[in-house]
Amino acid sequence: MRKISIAALIIGFFFFAACSPGMDTPIKASSEEELENSIKSLSKNITQDEKKTLMEAMFFLAIKDEDIFSLLTPTDPDSYNKKMYGLWDGKTPNEIIKEANKERLDRKTKELDNIRGEIHELKLKKVMHDANKQELDSIIISNARFYHREGMLFNQPIIEFDIENLSSMSLARIFCHGVVSTPGRSVPWISEDFNHPISGGIEPGEKLHLTLAPNMFSEWGDKDAENRTDTILTVELVNIEGPDGEKVVPPFSNYDQKRLASLLENENTLLEEIEKLSV
């Protein structure tokens, strides 16, 4: 008997002319020959759009628990084909399409549940981040300066600024982002994070002047910035650590923001697909 693959039988739908509807005619698939003859007969009695819908449904059911490589090149074709015949034998095209749509709907619903779970976690993370970040607005950094102190062998970069704690909590460590720039220059000389433990902390209502000496071999030791006298230092407070050693602001990174936006788009797409499948 001539052997043909399941994929070839399904694709065969595209090569037969359509006549009148026959979507309620059962497919006979007790054997390879019977399936081939049934498909040829059926292809003459359904429209081209119906063929396309049915072919997609048959492909989906055939590979939902397999991969496309196994469908096209099964290791045991006879055994695999018999397994596939059982998916379609005695079922009408409408029944096959309905079964495929149910499987798709179940899969999309599970995907939606997973996405919504992650969306909930990220939204909660953002709410906590934004709520706690308001505390940072009550901590004022002013009079920031960047310069170099002359040393015996190398000049030491110096970060200097005032910090005033108008928040309701004690500060044990600060986490900042510093930018060293010059007027009229779009690209800064230095853009770097730094953190600093504060001996004795800064209690609510207190003000402290800090003079920090960052590693001269880090970005703060940039030689071009060292030779300039017109640099401007901007210091942004990004987080604080309390006496318990815990950061006050939970992290919510740029990646988290992009991930949340992507998941919200995927949620809308899945909702549209589920609505179509539910009709």
Image (spheres, rainbow, N blue to C red):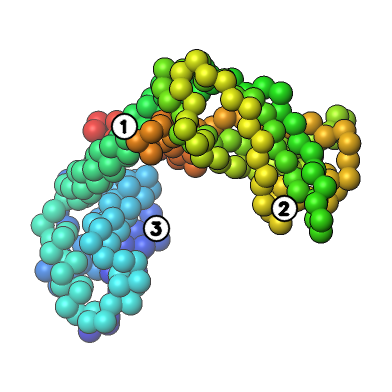
Q: Position of residue 125 (x, y in %)?
A: 37, 32
Q: Nearer the viewer, mark 1 or mark 2?
A: 2
Q: Separation of disc 1 and disc 3 at Cα?
A: 45 Å
Of 151 and 243, the residue lying toward us: 151
Q: Position of residue 10 (x, y in %)?
A: 31, 62
Where 214 sits versus 27, above or below?
above
The residue at 86%/29% (across/down) is 183
Mark 1 or 2 closer to N-term?
Answer: 1
Mark in front: 1 vs 3: 1
Q: Residue 44: x and y, percent?
A: 30, 54
Q: How many marks?
A: 3
> Residue 14: which disc?
3
Disc 1 target residue: 120
Q: Can you tell which mark lies on residue 49? A: none
User: Taking 230 as reference, is 139 left or right?
Assistant: left
Taking the image as shown, residue 23 lies to the left or right of residue 266, namely left
Which residue occupies the foreground of this view, 127 or 139?
Answer: 139
Q: To which residue does mark 2 refer?
A: 216
Q: Residues within 10 Å of mark 3 (few under 14, many from 20)?
A: few
